[in-house]
Amino acid sequence: MADASRRDFLKTLGTACVAIALAPLAEKLALADEVASDKQIPADYDWSKHKWGMAIDVEKCIGCGHCVVACKEENGVPKEPFYFRTWVERYQQYGEETVVDSPNGGYEGFSLENQREEKPDKSFFVPKLCNACEHSPCVQVCPVGATFETPDGAVLVDAEYCIGCRYCIQACPYGTRFLNPITGVADKCTLCYHRIHDGRQPACVENCPTQARLFGDLKDKQGPLNQFLREHKIHVLKPHLNTYPKVFYHGIDKEVR
């Protein structure tokens, strides 16, 4: 290849690489603007003043499944027992052995049928949902920028952009995503983003009879969420992954992943 042709080729390649590198960011910013223009969000809403998160007090969860039912009803999640934006797991410890189950995601609560005759040494329930990570693997792997983080901390999926490639589903270390069989795009918890901006709580929080779930603004230092985080011993799931979840747990054991 002549020098001039080689230079032209390299110049063209370099331009293409820059365009590819910048495209996801441009798309995410465009999507953020799209979210910002949503008429459900007040025009004077200051994105920089909020960072939404949730705390879960495992010691209060009774495994009733009301949160699972409320989530499915609120968000139109398919009723089949394979699709959940939130679900509840039961942990039962028998000596050194830990048994984990989640029949139908806890939608109908937890029965004592088919339990061992021996009483577990310890038993507790752990609600699961999207962890709204600061460093979200799902955002990083999305090839079209359909998964993005809003400036106030939610991780959302733009159904218009999603091509259903499932990369995000494979990348999520918490198993919180699924391919919606109705829409054909990736689906997950949004912290009920459509309810936040008119002052309502996520459906799972609103319907928890024991207040095991607490939703709030992490930038409100005197708010109830930060007060809870200050006053309790807090853990996040899989901290070694450095995803920096914005869902915090109180009362979980090391067996919980």
Image: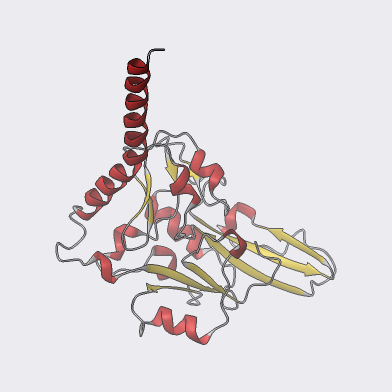
- In the image, 124 versus 176, the foreground residue is 176
Question: Which quarter of the figure is the C terminus placed in?
Answer: bottom right
Q: Does 249 sit above or below residue 74?
A: below
Number of labels in the image equals 0
Quick one: which residue is furthest to the left in this view?
43
- In the image, 70 versus 249, the foreground residue is 249
Which image quadrant is residue 105 in? bottom right
Q: Give the side of residue 255 with respect to residue 225, left or right.
A: right
Q: Give the side of residue 45 with respect to residue 238, left or right.
A: left
Quick one: which residue is furthest to the front in this view?
3
- In the image, 202 versus 135, the foreground residue is 135
In percent of width and height, residue 129 lies at: 51, 59
Residue positioned 50% across, 50% down in the render: 137
Question: Which quarter of the figure is the N terminus placed in?
Answer: top left
Whether residue 159 is visible to the viewer of this picture, yes or no, is no
Residue positioned 71% across, 72% down in the render: 123
Query: Coloured how?
Result: secondary structure
In percent of width and height, residue 95 lies at: 84, 71
Residue positioned 42% across, 78% down in the render: 225
Residue positioned 39% across, 56% down in the render: 190
Q: Does 17 sit above or below residue 50?
A: above
- In the image, 20 versus 185, the foreground residue is 20
In percent of width and height, residue 31 lies at: 27, 47
In percent of width and height, residue 109 lies at: 59, 62
